[in-house]
Image (cartoon, rainbow, N blue to C red):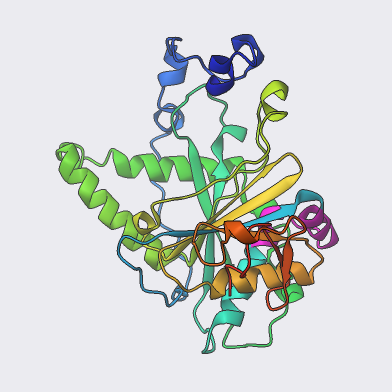
Amino acid sequence: SRYFVLKGDIDESETNALSPESVPCEEEWENAYRKFYTGRKIAENKSEGETHKLPMEPIDDYLKVIFGIMPFEDIERVAKKYSASVTEVLAAAEMLAMIKRSYEPINDVIRISVPINLRQFFPTESLRNFAGDTVLEFRPEGRDDITFDEVIASLAGVLKKKITKEYAQDFIDKTYGKNINTITRWVPYFVKHKVVNSSQKKDHRNSMSVILTNLGKTELSPKIAEKVERCDSIPGNVTLYGLPITTSPITHNGYTNISFSINNRDTSFPKEFFKILCSLGVRIRVESTDDNGYDESKKDENGKRCPHCDVDLGEEYTVCPLC
């Protein structure tokens, strides 16, 4: 929005963003975790079974982002068909993609972390981070003939039942309780930061297969929304989570754009994911930050379609980024 204001396209009053010159009020500075912390001790509730891990070794100083752009009405139609949320549909497709791409039967538990908007239960004006997460699970039990219907049947409606105010309160008490632990409270920040990052990375590797951060629909002011053609969410630092892939969808102007941040050249996981959605009637166009397939001199305004992945390609692609 600041860009359009500086260009003179819109007035400051026509945005819903804060001005750089404005002074944050006390409510915007507050730590919402501390505000709603009750002091209760919450025991760790760990699910049984080892977490399935994608067998992909990270490549140093390498990051590729693959984008899938799909009409929101297509993915919403699938969600309504199965009485599920959009997040649950995307999670089910990711779980099935892991099963299909695996060369060996999966006996471990597939776990996908999804975010929780804590503000829906605890209103706050804070501009600081105030979000939680929960985990969706599926147990393949060594089977390789699992269908999408089976996976989505186990997930449909789970988030609505699971994400309650009580669950959110437990999350706040557990998370903030760790931060104010009397043993670590007086540890220097630079030491604590290093230890916490290492601990979080290990926890992510052991407790989740993939992170699915669905940011939902954008909330831009009407004047801004009409000028923004597309929005993408790109979790750049994949190694921070200790995982080879992180995924993040965001919906804007009638389209859901999901990004796969990958620090490995293996594209089999997103390839299977897109093929599954296409089989459900979702129209998808795929793009990538990789140079593979990009040829400015061979642009085709009508685009192309990959017969192997069943996805549309951006107009500048001569080879499918997934292949």
Give the left or right position of residue 218, taking residue 24 as reference. Answer: right
81 sits left or right of 113 in the view: right
Can residue 41 be seen at all in this image of the molecule?
yes
Picture layout, residue 4 above or below residue 63: above
Q: Nearer the viewer, residue 13 or 288?
A: 288
Answer with the quarter of the image where residue 58 lies: bottom left
In this rendering, is residue 256 above or below 272? above
x and y, in percent, of residue 264 in the image? 42, 69
Query: Can you say whether 18 is above or below 120 in the image?
Result: above
Query: Against 11, is 76 above or below?
Result: below
* Residue at image point 46% right, 19% down: 28
**Which quadrant: the C terminus?**
bottom right
Estimate the x, y position of residue 98 in percent, counting from the top left.
57, 75
- Is-magenta flag for residue 182? no
| Horizontal arrangement in the rendering, residue 209 relative to residue 67 (left or right) | left
Q: Main secondary structure of the magenta part?
A: helix
Q: Position of residue 132 (x, y in %)?
A: 50, 44
* Quadrant location, the N terminus: top right
Residue 95: in sight, yes or no? no
Residue 283 position, x and y percent, is 78, 61
Q: Residue at x 64, y 61 (%)?
A: 298
Report the span colored magenta. 74-90
The residue depicted at 68 percent of the width and 40 percent of the height is 217
Quarter of the image for residue 227 reads top right
Q: Which residue is rendered at x = 80% and y = 60% of the image?
A: 78
Residue 81 lies in the magenta stretch: yes
Q: Quadrant of residue 191?
A: top left
Residue, far front? 297
> For this rendering, which residue is in front, 36 or 223?
223
